[in-house]
Amino acid sequence: MHFAFCILIFYMWQRVKNIYHLVQAILANTFYGFPSGKLKVIGVTGTDGKTTTACLIYHILKSTGKKAALISTVGAFIGDKIYDVGFHVTNPATFPLQRFIREVADRGNEFLVLEVTSHGLDQNRVWGIKFDIGVLTNIAHEHLDYHANWEEYAEVKFNLLNNSRVCILNYDDKSYSFWKSKIKNQKSKIQIKSQKEKQFQIVTYSLNNQEANITWKKYPFKTNLIGDFNKSNCLAAIAATDAVGVSDSQIRTALKTFKPPAGRLETVYDKEFRVIIDFAHTPNAFKSMLPEIKKVTKCRLIHVFGSAGARDAVKRPQMGAESARYADIIILTAEDPRDEQVEDINSQIRQGISDKFKFHSSKDQSIPNVKAQNEVFEIARRDKAINFAINIAQKRDTVLLTGKAHEKSMNYGHGEEPWDEFEEVKSALSNYPLKSVQIPARK
């Protein structure tokens, strides 16, 4: 009874805060003159893949000579300027967001690619933005500390689609059956060449299902990206750029030259062994990405990860289970624990790890046998966990670091502290006792 009352109070307070955010959004839009009305805005939302998809769309538009800007998790790219959007932020607060959009419009851009989160939608941070195209990558298990359940989470994502002229949807995702009965017009079209065509449209994409409008078979292309999940992201980007009139040949050419954004399956060292940094932090992301990494790993896969504190705790055992399916050695560590104990978070992750793994407590950090497999180490400080992972790596192993990637801060419960995953890897490699190893400077 007490728990139910607390949940009720939480959601009431959340609704009050959202009203406050709505007022802020109205004021911000009014102050900056509703700048999105001067642009063709392409909104990209989804649990996983939205940053890569948004960057793909932006790259294709820029490669074909169109004036475009991007506001995403990795920053705001406006003209020749790159702005940091803030700690752990995808959608900035309404006033900074509208200021960015005003600058995008003032610089004479035609397009804005905007990454949109469920929090940004629910908290009215993107209120007043006129979306021409809405792209949904997927809806998986995430943010259920904030949303009551998966259905509510999906409903919030649906708000972007319902306010877009063109909806681009993933035919392969389980959310497909959820939204299809809600969309106001179910007639799908693929040829969206006329910019004067204003009626509501749905475009679907799929890796394999030929009932979708855009598929790998109907629209073959080449990409340097790894994994089927990235091919799916490419299909979403194809649908979005086709919808604004980019030609097939231009799209295919641009896809060949695309490089993933910072911390998206980014290989930062590849000599004696490989080190890869990725932002994956959900069970679905692990399920999609880990088997692809396993395919290109000749020996052991060493996976370093944790789970954010004061966030969706239900996903933690699921993340452990997915990691255990593919990793040979798991190193559990911090990922913004905030006011939770890292040990408590990792204990919940371990609940999903199969019994075949031998657990080493935080006090036991002895270097395992070079052929050791099915072992779990717990090292609370992330810098020490990275150093340990690189120290135990052998020839042809892969060290995979997930969860932090591009983020520039870490929260151990005392506010934001500076953090740089790439620099920590570089430091660990430079101190590696057995070999002299270096990684090139990031461009």
Image (spheres, helix red, strand yellow):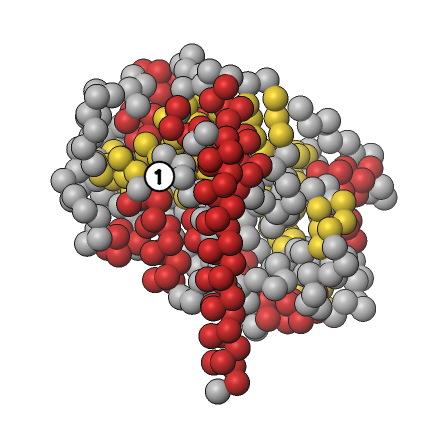
Q: Give above or below for 327 relative to 187.
A: below
Residue sticking out furthest to the top: 65
Q: Give the image location of residue 189, x and y in percent.
A: 17, 33
Is residue 210 among the parts visible in the rendering? no
Q: Residue at x 65, y 45 (%)?
A: 87
Is residue 253 among the parts visible in the rendering? yes
Looking at the rendered structure, the kind of residue marked 1 is: Val
Task: Between residue 305 and residue 64, name the one nearer to us.
Answer: 64
Image quadrant assignment for residue 92: top right
Q: Residue at x 46, y 42 (%)?
A: 26
Residue sticking out furthest to the bottom: 1
Label count reads 1
Image quadrant assignment for residue 255: top left
Q: Residue at x 73, y 26 (%)?
A: 441
Task: Between residue 139 and residue 31, name the one nearer to us.
Answer: 31
Q: Is residue 329 left or right of residue 61?
A: right
Q: Is residue 286 left or right of residue 172?
A: right
Could you tell me which quadrant the C terminus lies in?
top right
Q: Give the image location of residue 347, x and y in percent.
A: 64, 71
Q: Residue at x 61, y 64 (%)?
A: 310
Circle 1 residue: 135
Q: Give the image location of residue 326, x and y in percent.
A: 52, 55
Task: Between residue 240 and residue 123, name the one nearer to us.
Answer: 123
